[in-house]
Each structure stands twice: as structure tokens, then as C-alpha cells.
Amino acid sequence: MGKEVFCMQYWLEIRTLAGAGLSRRAIARQLRVSRNTVRQVLSGKPSPPQKKPRHLSRLLLPFHGEVLKMAEKGLIGTRILHEIRAQGYTGGMTAFYRFLGEVKQSLPRKREKATVRFETPPGHQAQFDWSPYRVPLGGVLTKVVVFDLIYAYSRRKFYWPSLVETQAAVFEAIERGFAHFGGTCAELLVDNARVFVKDARPEHFEWNPRFLDFCKHYEILPRACPRRRGQTKGKVERPFYYLEQHFIKGNQFLDFEDFARHLAEFGAGLDDQLHHTTKVTPRERFEEERVALGALPPGSFFGAAQLFRKVSWDCMVSFDGSKYSVPFPFAGKEISVKVSQGVFLEIYSGKGERIASHRLAHQKGSVTIEQSHYEGLRKQAPHTLANLKRAFSEEFPEDLLFLEKLLAQYKWNGHHHLRALLELVSLYGKEDLRAALAAAMTYNTFSSSFVRGILERQGRLKEELPLATVVPVPRFKLKRSLAEYGQLLLGEGRVD
């Protein structure tokens, strides 16, 4: 409260109490002011003191409307000052905060508990937390969870958004942060949420077993923040206030991807700002911390989020009632899928390499296709039997006997096998396919699935294609002519 307001308030109260017949001593005691103050007011001018108008900087006048509008939204002073400077304000901070103080002078101030700052050496501790927000995405208020991983020594931060607040989402956010920083700290400080702690009571404390598996995978030591002691995680909790005031409030986003992109830019900008405690930017201080970080393991931690699927021969994988395309070299292979950020379906090869990512379908029964997954395949094989026979004859002129026997064995669906054989050329090459055709001839079996099984067992994908895990060939029921069994009986003798 300013001095003028103070004088006005006490001038009125002193004059009122004096008019009620109270003595100067009684007025001073009741208002907790000195008797000299009471005497000065009662012996002074009969009119109250006038508030002297302050002359605001002319540079600030054009921005009065914007300042008032942002103050009504609850934006903090540094955010408002940053915004009007971006709009062209070149005046000083004193004039700005004088005006802003008059606007907010009636708002109560919160008192914070005094704490002793705890510093850690480079690479020793990372702190993790998250906070949900209601964010306008495409004009619709949507719950978005923002995860924050901060390395305590350098103060570098990593923000990761998600539409879900599950254990899998928490683990994914931490993993993404480790990958972003290129290494892990010795210990990870978390709160007592159920995703981390099964029982938070000090006398019965117990970690969540899956979280322990996660920590074991990354060779980090988990550390829980003491209950009702949020200051322990002050380095990670304070940035959420800054994030809300400087990024969330007053902003609109086209969709989730737009929000994620701007959030990443906002976090990158914070790394280049001078830190008021360390007196250097987090990015500069991180150079000292980088050498102390632990190495990342070769693969990700999947845990319960990992679901196994088999890719169909049309390069599609099913998940939650919908289908998604997969790069064609993985057709027929075992892969794994998991949901990322509550928005995307990520697909991984048998070696743990991410091979595709799709936005989750909103309706069951949807089919999501990325055309690049089919690039490199030959042009679609003909559909009519006549064109298929001509295409096979041109591709394999030396294997016309195989074609003749295939059509004799599969009179009604020979076109299906021919089309599948022609498509295998793009995956395995002409010479390997010819060798597989010759092997099939020895078994007198001409189905495309049998030929494909031989190629898979050999594992000879084209060198320019990414390798995938080879699935063992299943047993096939082979058909032999009765004449062969007759010769077997003549040679070995009849067995009753």
C-alpha cells in the first residue's frame, strides 16, 4: 500500500475516532500509531491529504490497454513486460512496475517459507515432476499434461507433453529426457505418486516394482521426496509456475502437435537465459555436467506398454480395432507397438528400432496408411490371370514348368499365388526367388506361402532394405503323389 493511501486511511480513522470523543492516547492505542501522528492529523488542515498524480513515462502510455488486459488475466509482471517489449516498448522497468503496482496494490501477497538451497554436483541428480493444464487446442479446451525433467546442477529443463497421465506416459517422458540430454544422472528425485511409490508411509515405505525395473534398466538410484516437503524438488516445481505464466496463459494452439512444437521452442529458449542463481545460462553450465553423465543403455524400457503384433502381408498391423501401415520389408514379421503421448502409435522392429509412427485413429475400423511405407515395391501386379501369366513368363522365362504345375495344382486360385510370387521379387530379388522356386519344385508344392517360407528361412532380404527379425518357418503339409508312396512300399516292403 502506497504512502498516500496510508495517509488517507489513517486520516479518516483518526478524525472519525476523535469525533466520537476518544482521547489521543486511546486513538493511538487502537490504531497502533504514535501519538505524534494523531496530534499531527488533528492539528492539521481540515481537508484530507491529496494524492499527488504520478507522471508515467510517455513511452508506456500506448501500452496501457494491453498492460491492463494482461493484468486482468493474472499474468505476472515479467511476462507482461516481455510481451509489451516485443510490441515495441523501450521504456524502463521502474515506470512499468510503478503502474503495475498501482493496478495490483489491492491484491494480497503470499508469504513464502524460507528454505536453505541444496546444491548437487554435476551429473548427480535429476528431478522429475508433471502438471496438468487446460489448454485451448483448435479452439477446444483440452487437458494436456506437461512433464518436466531437470538436471539439478545445470538447471537444463526438458518439457514433454502428453494427453494421458499413466505410468507408461511417465516412463516415456523420463526416457525422452534422458535421450535429449544424452545421458543419465546418478539419482532421480521424484515425488510419492503411485507410479513411483507403492507405500509412502515412512515406516512401511515401498517402491513401485515396475519403477524399480525402470531404474535398473537405466542404472539410476531412485530417491523419493519427503512427504509434505515440496521444497526438496524446488528446482523442478518452480519452473511450472514460470511455464504457466509465460507460456500457457493467454496462448492458443492449433492442435497437439502445434502445442508440442511451441513447448519445445519455449524450453530451448530457457536454456539460453541467464539463471539468477548460477549467474550463467543452463546451456553453458551443462557443458560441465555433460562429462559426468552416465551412458544410456542400448534399448528403451518397454515394460507393460509393449504389445506384440504380427504384420500382415499387406503391410498392416492391427491395434485397438484399427489398422496402420508398416514399411514393406517387415511384412509377415513380429513387431511391437506402444502408445506415445496418448496421441501416436509407435511401431518397433524385433531389434527395438522404431520403424513407424502414426496418429491414433479416433474411430475403430479406421485404416491409416503412409505411402512411403510402400515405396520400393514393384508396381502392383496384374489382376487378370492372362496378364499374370504373361508377367511371370517375362520375369522367369526359365521357370515355365513351375508356372504350368502351379496352375495345374491351383485351378481355382492360381492367380492369387502368381500375384504373391511376383510381389516377392521386390523383397528378395530375382535370383533368390528362382532358387526358392527350384526348391519348391523338389517338393512338388507350388504355393506362394511355401516359396515365401523358404525365402524367410534363408533370410536373404535385399541389402538396401532394413533388416528385420526372421520368424521361423511353420511346418507345411506337403502333398505327394500316390506313385511315390507305392515306390516306397515296394522298396521297403509292406508293413501290416
Image (tube, rainbow, N blue to C red):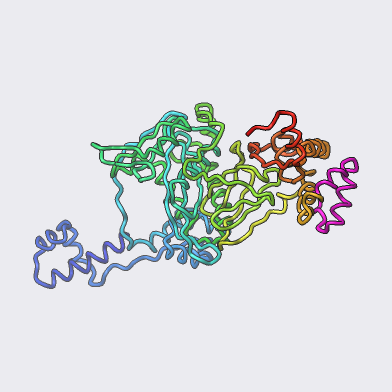
Q: Is residue 28 left or right of residue 151?
A: left
Residue occupying the point 55% across, 37% down: 179
Residue occupying the point 22% across, 64% down: 10
The location of residue 422, given as percent across then percent down, is 80, 47
- Residue 222, placed above or below residue 403: above
The location of residue 245, given as percent across then percent down, is 45, 55
The location of residue 459, given as percent across then percent down, is 71, 34
Q: Is residue 72 magenta?
A: no
Q: Is residue 408 left or right of residue 191?
A: right
Q: Is residue 390 magenta?
A: yes
Number of residue marks: 0
Please give the range of residues in magenta.
377-406
- Is residue 111 visible in the rendered image? The answer is yes
Residue occupying the point 64% across, 57% down: 368
- Residue 105, placed above or below residue 47: above
Residue occupying the point 50% across, 39% down: 156
User: For this rendering, which residue is in front, 78 or 326?
Assistant: 326
The quadrant in which residue 215 appears is top left
Q: Quadrant of the C terminus?
A: top right
- Residue 30, placed above or below residue 296: below
